[in-house]
Amino acid sequence: MPSLLEARNLTVAYGGIQAVKDVSFEINEGELVCFIGANGAGKSSLLKALCGMAPAAAGAMHFQNQSITHLPVHEIVRRGIALVPEGRGIFSRMTVKENLEMGAYTRHDLAIDADMEKAFVLFPRLKERLKQQAGTLSGGEQQMLAIARALMGRPKLLLLDEPSMGLAPLMVQKIFETIREVSKAGMTILLVEQNAKLALEVSQRGYVMESGAITLNDDAEALAKNADVRKAYLGD
Amino acid sequence: MRDIEVIVARKTTSPYPAWLGLALIAVALIAAPFLVQASLGTYWVRILDLTLLYIMLALGLNIVVGYAGLLDLGYVAFYAVGAYLYALLASPQFGVHLPFWLLLPLGALVAGLFGVLLGAPTLRLRGDYLAIVTLGFGEIIRIFITNLDRPLNVTNGPQGINLIDPIAISGFSFARPQELFGINSVQAYYYLFLALTLLIMFVCLRLQDSRIGRAWVAIREDETAAEAMGINTHNMKLLAFAMGASFGGVSGGLFASFQGFISPESFNLMESIMILCMIVLGGMGNIPGVILGAFLLTILPEALRYVGDLQRLVFDRVLVDPADLRMLLFGLALVLMMIFRPAGLWPSKQRQRELVKDDELHPGLYDEQK
């Protein structure tokens, strides 16, 4: 499978403090890859760098064999990388429909309505609440909306930042089922998650991050069996 | 909640066609200067002109504050730039007398440029920090103009610029007492201002529903998410700044020609705050609300002048200076607004949503969840 995203020796720094140190990885088309690790391991900073929100201090990123290292956020989004931000970042005073329309902001084609219908197959709940103000949705529904909104831009790569954050356990299960379905439909997904157990369950491959560096990478199944990972992240 | 019901009821049960309302408004707007002239005198037609000027200013600032959510406390600087540009290029100050149809677009352009000049380095700041920088900018422009009479006299300093050319269209000067079709000077200005106000309103309405308008709302709601949607947030904010500034520039030019005299006094911080108050009072982001706010805050202080006469009539002397009373009532109005109508007198639907409790707006919302 051809590689869709490739990062080489990527370093992200905030005023001298290195949040991500010399990280290299790649994501192939159609894969669901997770990055797990503790709070402050640099997972979110890595995502921010991938979509241009945090500048790369060193290293290079390539998307579809083109450099995106120094591109501004809106350019990267236009190339097909969609971010579902941490804490969902929905437009709470817009309606659900307006939120979905914002997701298609970069598009000018006529298939937007059809895509919205497709999104409703995955997220039937959103159709019921189409005219409702997004801020009044429950946390889980907001996360669904955030994912659906990101898909409206027809991305080639979906970046999910802590989709389980602040959700009830039952809702978390539901969100992960949805992520698995989106992946099955052919979407390439990079998932950053603290809930290592669930993340490894849905993913094909995984990277373990520790204080800014990748310490392990393997098939998700192998990682889930790895003694160190079990001890550090799975509560054994 | 009640307000929403009223609005819904108004929308669904009106037995009259929409054009009838518009026609009535049009007739009222056309007749207004004559009715006011006949009943209250020329002074009040002047107030009416000023009201239109403030509506233009408020609509301009509304783009920055109401749409894009950028708190600009130095908006009056762009007004000043437009006014001084007009004054310098159409007065005996330099002996230059350019026509208004050249100066107004030029004013819009130069003020817009100043908007970009201010915006480019500062728009990475958010919220309060941006407010402080814009506040500083407003003061810098005013002080700059005040002191630009030495070593080379450009702005005439605190004395201001006098004898500014009135607007003239093919030989008909708006200032001369001559009458054209029975219209006097202030009435002529009224129609000119009205036409420009309608134009600015139209631009604002179109912007609101455009991609640009949507992008502004998204930035206002959540800048990070807006960025993730592929919006070039920096350029969009800059555009909001430039557009707001250019409307301010046009208003400034009109003000200069209308008054015939300007000085740095007219462009102090209080003026910026006043324009901001018009927006907040009327309803941020909603064009009818902003117009209402501008109208009320221009008319009411004038109306308060009569309170002095009333006091003299009743008590034989003025007990409370109307000017003091004005600030007092103004403060009281703002406090009352904060308590009873925090989103303004006539808020936009989006702002209104913020006001109403979720479960009232959507009964049964929380029943089946969690």
Image: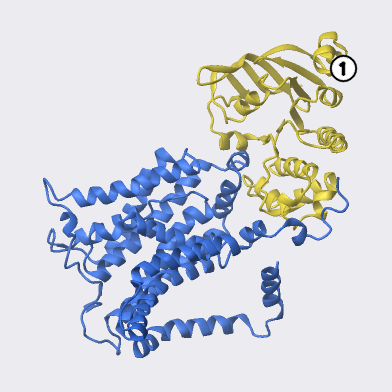
Chain colours: A yellow, B blue
Judge whether residue B153 can be spotted in this image: yes
Residue A25, placed above or below residue B265: above
Residue under the point 71% across and 44% down: A149
Residue farthest to the front, as pictured:
B315
Residue with the mark numbered 1:
A221
Tell me: B363 left or right of A110: right
Residue under the point 68% across and 42% down: A153
Tell me: B227 left or right of A146: left
Q: How many marks?
A: 1
Which percent across, then down, holds residue B200? 44, 65
Residue A173, placed above or below residue B284: above
Type of residue at label 1?
Answer: Glu
The residue closer to the viewer here, A205 or B255, is B255
Which percent across, then down, holds residue A207? 75, 17
The residue closer to the viewer here, B332 or A157, is B332
Other residues around mark 1 within 10 Å, as few (<14) / some (14–19) / many (≥20): some
Q: Quadrant of residue A45?
A: top right
Chain of the residue on which disc 1 is drawn: A
Residue under the point 84% across and 58% down: B364
Q: Quadrant of residue B358?
A: bottom right
Quarter of the image where the N terminus of chain B is located: bottom right
Residue B158, placed above or below residue A4: below
Tell me: A130 left or right of A77: right
Residue under the point 75% across and 30% down: A188
Identify the secondary structure beneath mark 1. helix
Judge whether residue B82 can be spotted in this image: no
Which percent across, then down, holds residue B268? 31, 56
Q: Quadrant of residue B357?
A: bottom right
Which percent across, then down, holds residue B335? 52, 61
Residue farthest to the top, as pictured:
A227
Quarter of the image where the C terminus of chain B is located: top right
